[in-house]
């Protein structure tokens, strides 16, 4: 259990300065910052060195969607962990952004698997991508506008995300 080193409410300047101190969010902040930097490097590398000449543009786009979604997820998460102690309003907004980043990363990680996994079945590939995109928009809207899910308990929302996870990685379509 963490018994000390919690950050109190801090000004934006002190929140930023706290990145260089040990506290309860240090590990979360730095692992997400470093992961974000790594995925920016993966983007540069994958779009220049990895792709063979003549690679179809949609192959590049499928991989790029995944990598950009990871950068977004890690960027907003590191901002949340660094500036979440500024004030309650910031905490609530950044917490929403953190969940949106997770949703975007789950959705983005589905794209290359479906694109390359169903490359021999173009019709079903696009049906799956379209259906999953619609479901992820619903999940994203639940996070962006909490009033949409205000009448729902945590259980239906949790079920939505379990369903999204199982569907996006092909478990439900296979069943």
Image (cartoon, rainbow, N blue to C red):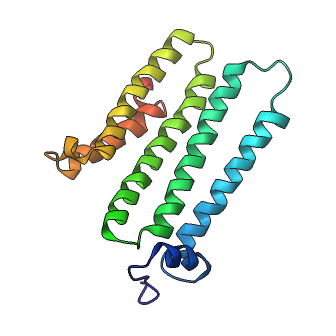
Q: Position of residue 26 (x, y in %)?
A: 55, 75
Near-viewer residue (16 or 168): 16
Near-viewer residue (99 or 120): 99
- Residue 21 shows in this picture: yes
Write the residue at 56% across / 73% down.
27
Q: Is residue 135 above or below residue 54?
A: below
Q: Quadrant of residue 164?
A: top left
Q: Is residue 163 above or below residue 28?
A: above
Write the residue at 43% across / 55% down.
98
Q: Quadrant of residue 43?
A: top right
Q: Residue furthest bottom?
A: 4
Q: Is residue 13 above or below residue 106?
A: below
Write the residue at 39% across / 83% down.
8
| In this rendering, position of residue 117 left or right of residue 172 | right
Q: Position of residue 23 (x, y in %)?
A: 51, 82
Quadrant showing the N terminus: bottom left
Q: Residue furthest left?
A: 151
Q: Position of residue 89 (x, y in %)?
A: 31, 64
Q: Quadrant of residue 84?
A: bottom left
Q: Position of residue 80 (x, y in %)?
A: 46, 62
């Amino acid at each position: 259990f963490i018994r000390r080193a919690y950050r109190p409410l801090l000004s934006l300047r002190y929140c930023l300065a706290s990145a260089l101190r040990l506290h309860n969010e240090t590990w979360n902040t730095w692992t997400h910052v470093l992961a974000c930097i790594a995925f920016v490097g993966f983007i540069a590398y994958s779009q220049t060195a990895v792709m063979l000449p003549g690679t179809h543009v949609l192959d590049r786009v499928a991989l790029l969607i995944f990598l950009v979604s990871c950068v977004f997820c890690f960027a907003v998460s590191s901002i949340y962990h660094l500036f979440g102690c500024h004030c309650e309003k910031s905490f609530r907004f950044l917490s929403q952004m953190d969940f949106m980043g997770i949703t975007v990363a789950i959705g983005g990680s589905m794209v290359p698997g479906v694109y390359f996994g169903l490359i021999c079945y173009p019709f079903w590939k696009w049906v799956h991508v379209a259906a999953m995109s619609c479901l992820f928009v619903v999940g994203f809207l639940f996070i962006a506008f909490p009033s949409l899910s205000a009448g729902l308990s945590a259980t239906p929302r949790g079920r939505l995300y379990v369903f999204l996870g199982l569907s996006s990685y092909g478990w439900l379509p296979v069943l």
